[in-house]
Image (cartoon, rainbow, N blue to C red):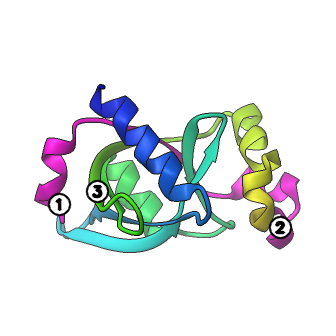
Amino acid sequence: MSDRIGGAAAVSAELADDPTVHITTIGRRTGRPRRIEIWMIEVDGRFFITGTPGRRDWLANLAATPEFVVHLERRAGLDLAARAWIVDDPDLRRAVFDHPSAAWYRSQEPVEVLVATAPMVEIEFGDRSSASTMR
């Protein structure tokens, strides 16, 4: 099984009952690791991190350095290397916010506002060997 498939399966299992994960990004100004707790959602086998509208350091960090680590602590006990892509396609953004896993976000802001202004990245999982360097 490839790391990409194995990583996605582990993330799916982790998100099955709780969207909470930890991520470590690289600070865009300091170059130092920055670890936060955040929600990740799965939509049709693809993974996204989003939020309510506003400035987000995690997004700025990922825009500067898209490689980061997802820490799956509750079930899998894994640190997975990942790469983020900023999602700016309105149709994909709408599909994510319309998905049942994004219900909480819709309770905070109208879908139109989320589609137009909320931070969003799509995540792809890759080689796990580099993950331990960002712990």
Q: Secondary structure at mark 1?
A: helix
Q: Which residue is mark 2?
A: 109
Spatial CA span between label 3 and label 1? 13 Å
- Residue in the foreground of this view, choosing between 45 and 39: 45
Q: Comparing marks 2 and 1, which lies closer to the viewer?
A: 1
Q: Is residue 44 left or right of residue 66?
A: right
Residue 52 against residue 6 in the figure, above or below: below
Callout 2 touching callout 1 (CB < 8 Å): no
Spatial CA span between label 2 and label 1? 33 Å
x and y percentages locating residue 60 in the rendered image: 42, 59
Q: Is residue 95 left or right of residue 74?
A: right
Q: Which residue is mark 1?
A: 134
Spatial CA span between label 2 and label 3? 33 Å
| Residue beneath the point at 33% across and 44% down | 82
Identify the image quadrant of residue 52.
bottom right
Task: Confirm whether the magenta stretch covers residue 124.
Answer: yes
| Residue beneath the point at 48% across and 57% down | 14
Callout 2 touching callout 3 (CB < 8 Å): no
Q: Is residue 117 left or right of residue 75?
A: right
Q: Secondary structure at mark 2?
A: loop
Q: Earlier in the sequence, mark 3 or mark 1?
A: 3
Q: Residues within 10 Å of mark 2 (few under 14, many from 20)?
A: some
x and y percentages locating residue 107 in the rendered image: 85, 70
Give the amino acid at mark 1: Met
**Residue 65 shows in the view:** no
x and y percentages locating residue 130 in the rendered image: 14, 46
Q: Which residues are magenta?
A: 106-135
Q: Earlier in the sequence, mark 2 or mark 1?
A: 2
Q: Check residue 78 in the rendering and tell me which mark sits there, or answer none.
A: 3
Q: Earlier in the sequence, mark 2 or mark 3?
A: 3
Task: Confirm whether the magenta stretch covers residue 78.
Answer: no
Look at the image and tell me in which quarter the N terminus lies. top left
